Image: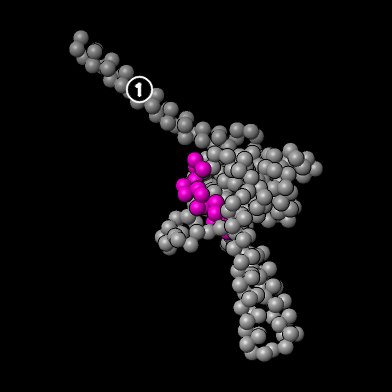
Amino acid sequence: MNAVEARKRNKREKKLDRTDTTDKISDKDGEPEASESVTDESDEAGSSGSEESSWISWFCGLNGNELFVEVDDEYIQDDFNLTGLNNIVPNYEYALDMILDAESDDLTDEQTEIVEAAAEQLYGLIHARFILTSRGLSHMVDKYNNAEFGRCQRVLCNLQPLVPIGQSDVPQANTVKMFCARCQDIYHPKLSKHANVDGAYFGTTFAHMLFHTYPHLVPSPPTQTYVPRIYGFKLQPGSTYRLLAPNTKTATSSADTSKVSKDERSKEERSAKR
C-alpha cells in the first residue's frame, strides 16, 4: 500500500507542478484567461493520458506478451495474494515497486536492467495466480472467445480455440504450451515469439479451471478419427507394425541359420576327433 500511495502522490505533485508552471508562463506573457483555461485543459488531458500508461500496460503490450492479461492493481496491492513470492523472485521489493510504477531513482542502468528482469518474473508468477480468480478468468475467457491464443492445428478438431497451459508450476522448468479441450492434448505455440514464455506464468491448473468454471465452453469430443489407408483399403489395427515383420523374420531366420551352422560344425569336429 505504501508503494501505491507514493506513486499516486508523485503523480499529483507532477500534475500540480505542470499547472503552476503554465500559470506563470501565461501571466508573464499577458495572455487572456481563455487561453489559460485551454492550456490547463490540455495539461489535464495530457496528465490523464500519462496516468493511464503503466508498467503493466507496457509489459502486456510488448511483442510476444499477447498471452498475458493485465492484473488489477488492487490484486497486487493485497499482500496475501503475493505470499511466498518474495522467496522466489530476487530483488522482490524493487521489482514490486517497478510493477506498481513506484520506481526508485537511485538505481544505475545496470541495476535497473536486473530489476526489470525480476519484475517480469514477479509479474508472471502473480499473473498465474490472478487468472485463477473470477476476474482473471473473465479476462482470459474474452481472449479465448476471440481465439487470441490460437487454434488447434489438428484437422479433426475443426479449428478449436486453444488456451495456454504450463507443464509445471516451477519457474524456468518448461515453456508455455497450448491446450486443446477437444482432443485433450497439448501443443507447442504456433508463433515463435511465444516459444520462450515461461509455462509457470500460466500454471498447470488454469486451463482446466477455465472449463470447470465455464462448462458451456467445453467442446464436444471429436466425432471422427483419422483412418490410415493403402490404395483405399483400411489398415487394421497393428497393420502398420506388421510392415516391419519381414525384416524381423529375416533377422530371426539368419540368426537361426548361423546357430544351426555352428552346431553342425561342432558335430563335424567331434566326429573327426573320433
Residue shown at 43% from the left, 63% from the top: 109
Q: Quadrant of residue 78?
A: top right
The image shows residue 242 at horizontal and vertical percentages of: 56, 33
Of residues 121 and 32, the one nearer the viewer is 32
Report the residue that reaches farthest toward the left.
273
Residue that label 1 marks? 259
Report the residue that reaches farthest toward the bottom.
30
Where's the C terminus, which quadrant?
top left
Query: In the image, is residue 111 above or below residue 232?
Result: below
Indicate whether residue 100 is drawn in magenta.
Answer: yes
Of residues 18 and 186, the one nearer the viewer is 18
Query: Which residue type carries mark 1?
Result: Lys
The image shows residue 167 at horizontal and vertical percentages of: 56, 40
Indicate whether residue 42 is drawn in magenta.
Answer: no
Report the residue that reaches farthest toward the right.
216
Of residues 118 and 218, the one nearer the viewer is 118
Residue shown at 67% from the left, 50% from the top: 74
